[in-house]
Amino acid sequence: MRLNNKVAIITGAGSGIGRETALLFAKEGAKIVVADIYEKGGEETASLINKIGEGYFAKVDVTKREELSQTIENTLKEYGKIDILVNNAGITQDALLVMMTEQQWDNVININLKGCFNCIQAVTGIMINQGSGAIINATSVVGLYGNIGQVNYAAAKAGLIGMTKALAKELGRKGIRVNAVAPGFIVTPMTSTVPEKVLQTMKDKTPLGRLGDPLDVAYAYLYLASDEAKYINGAILSVDGGLII
């Protein structure tokens, strides 16, 4: 029970990596706020959590600060504190630069980068008052090394790496650890539209010879959220099977 009696807000917890993370955290004793824009997936995750632990669904658009403020207020009323924030929500809208629309750029930056800023700012005051907290951001190997057709996504995830490192220095003195996980190619609904040929190429390039499972990332989140990582701050943990070494 590595997260016993901890309270965790997990964005994008309605499916994929977020759902697996929410379930894993619940098994480890955390009370979970399933924060997602999609009601169906979010309610399903919350229902699964309540079979093994405690949690509830909060409909949240991370680009809307008023919705985040309400979620924070409700969480404090329900549980009295916030120990962990996992910024897992994200989207892709891929296109080559010459074909990318301004809307595609704005959508990805607003959700993947500004959305994380919004969430972090919403919980920081509470964590400072508590004198403790763990913030974990979902970046990507694409943010570290780039990828054709994902200039918007790469920019957002690279920006999140910079944000993580800056906040680790800024908030560490307040007892708040800020780290990030950089997944490689993980089998989720987000990768379901990737052509099989591309996925096979990624498998071939990965030393472990397979694509990642959402639980591979969830366990990395769990470690960074736990007291086992109490002296880890500002780290970017790659979970990519050795794809980038």
Image: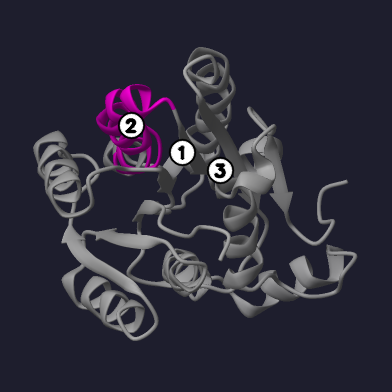
Q: Secondary structure at mark 3?
A: loop
Residue at point 22%, 40% (across, down) = 63
Query: Is the image coloured rainbow, by chain, by secondary structure, or in one colour?
Result: one colour
Dot 3: few (<14), some (14–19), or many (≥20) neighbours within 10 Å? many
Q: Which disc is residue 139 wearing? A: 3
In the displayed structure, would residue 197 be above or below residue 88? Answer: below
Q: Nearer the viewer, residue 27 or 113?
A: 27
**Amino acid tagged 3:** Thr
Farthest residue, direction bottom: 51
Mark 3 and mark 1 residues within 8 Å of each other at the beta carbon: no
Instruction: Give residue 114's position: percent from left, percent from top.
Output: 33, 32
**Residue extent of the magenta highlight:** 107-131
Instruction: Give residue 86's position: percent from left, percent from top.
Output: 44, 48
Instruction: Give residue 24's position: percent from left, percent from top.
Output: 51, 70
The residue indicated by pointer 2 is 114
Mark 3 → mark 2, Cα distance in angstroms: 13 Å
Q: Confirm whether the magenta stretch covers residue 108.
A: yes
Dot 2: few (<14), some (14–19), or many (≥20) neighbours within 10 Å? some
**Amino acid tagged 2:** Lys
Looking at the rendered image, the disc whose residue lies closer to the viewer, 1 or 2, is 2
Q: Earlier in the sequence, mark 3 or mark 1?
A: 3
Residue at point 75%, 66% (across, down) = 202
Q: Is residue 207 left or right of residue 31?
A: right
Residue at point 18%, 53% (across, down) = 60
Does residue 45 appear in this view? yes
**Amino acid tagged 1:** Asn
